[in-house]
Image: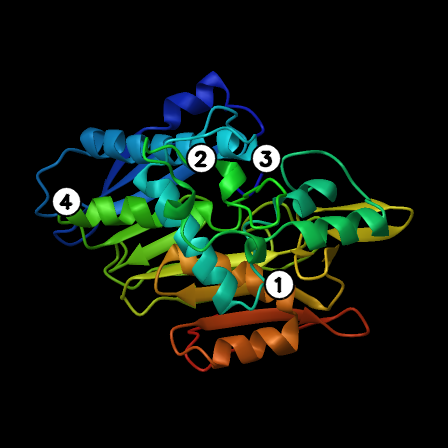
Amino acid sequence: MKDRPKGFPSHSILLALSVLVFFSCTERRYVAITGLAQGGTYTVKINLEGVETTPMVIKEGIDSILTLVDTTLSGYNKGSILSRFNRGEKIRPNGMFLETYGTARDLYRRTGGALDCAAGPLFDAWGFGFTTDSLPSKETVASLTASCGMKLLVEDLSSATGSDGLLDPAKVSLSGTPPHLNYNAIAQGYSSDLVASYLRSLGIKDMLVDIGEIFCDGVNPDGKPWTIAIDKPLDGNDVPGAHIFGIWQSSGNPCGVVTSANNRKFYIKDGVKYSHTIDPRIGFPVTHNLLSATIIAEDALHADAFATACMVLGLDAARKFILDDPGIEACLIYSLPGGSMESWTSPGFNLVQ
């Protein structure tokens, strides 16, 4: 849900969004399942050796999970629980809504405010949220920065929930300003994790789940750990895989793999480039030389969140953040004064090409 939905694929593409079965040269039996998700498509590659559930039933399960995410957390779906909450309506939160709010608060603390899922009005003001506004005045930015954010919301949503089970947005804010949540920085990673958990419940070990952000576990059809390409963060490099910086290889253990970059989502006005990465601590787009951050973490949600946070923090602070957390590995690509690119990788980041 990081990108605004662009409509649905054509009929011919829809016919291909199903199940492709392919076999490896060993006993492994892999299938690729594809479908629609969050304004784009998803791809799930799994080994069905020893699994009794059919691919079509698995696809139905995946689609039902993604539908629940959409109707709960999507800011583009005007009827979702999140959208109704942001409009100030009393809602009956489900477990997913409550869990995501708690996770967002934890990520806010862990990143020192660099990831703030309650800074939605700032993203909207710059045109990178759920509106098309752009170039807000300094006064508007200062006002929004002071009036929104996790720092101004209750710790536990139960304190704002009545005996009837309805959550009142007016009681969530500590400042009197209506809360406005935006989960674009974690929703795709969270979706990948939910699908992976479902697949594990069916007895599947070898998997690659790609819903805009990636979760992988086990091995690929060749019996080797999964490999994922890292794109060069070049302006105009809008096609994944067109310009490759390098290839990362997994260890075979479960992990999330997410890249955040500024080369695909920005606009230029009066000769100035405005990145989609907004620093919620100050309210303005970042201006440092960090071009992309590829994060390996325990799951796709945290990889998603930390990749965004690193792009807010900038090279030096991001490097420290990564080295201080033994559960994170990363590749940071940054620009030098002459315009060339350089990279830094953490000790455990397995860049094979």
Three-letter amino acid code at disc 3?
Arg
Number of numbered discs on residues: 4
- Which label was assigned to residue 202? 4
Q: Quadrant of residue 160?
A: top left
Three-letter amino acid code at disc 1?
Met
Q: Which residue is mark 2?
A: 41
Q: Nearer the viewer, mark 3 or mark 2?
A: 3
Question: Pointer 1 and pointer 4: residues touching (CB < 8 Å)?
Answer: no
Q: Residues within 10 Å of mark 3 (few under 14, many from 20)?
A: some
Q: How is the image coloured?
A: rainbow
Residue 129 in the figure: left or right of residue 216: right
Mark 1 to mark 2 CA distance (whole Å): 25 Å
Residue 292 in the figure: left or right of residue 270: left
Q: Is residue 335 above or below residue 170?
A: below
Determine whether the residue tagged by mark 1 lies in a helix, strand or loop: helix
Q: Residue furthest front?
A: 163
Q: Nearer the viewer, mark 1 or mark 2?
A: 1
Residue in front for this viewpoint, 158 or 339: 158
Mark 4 to mark 2 CA distance (whole Å): 23 Å
Q: Residue at x 50, y 75 (%)?
A: 322
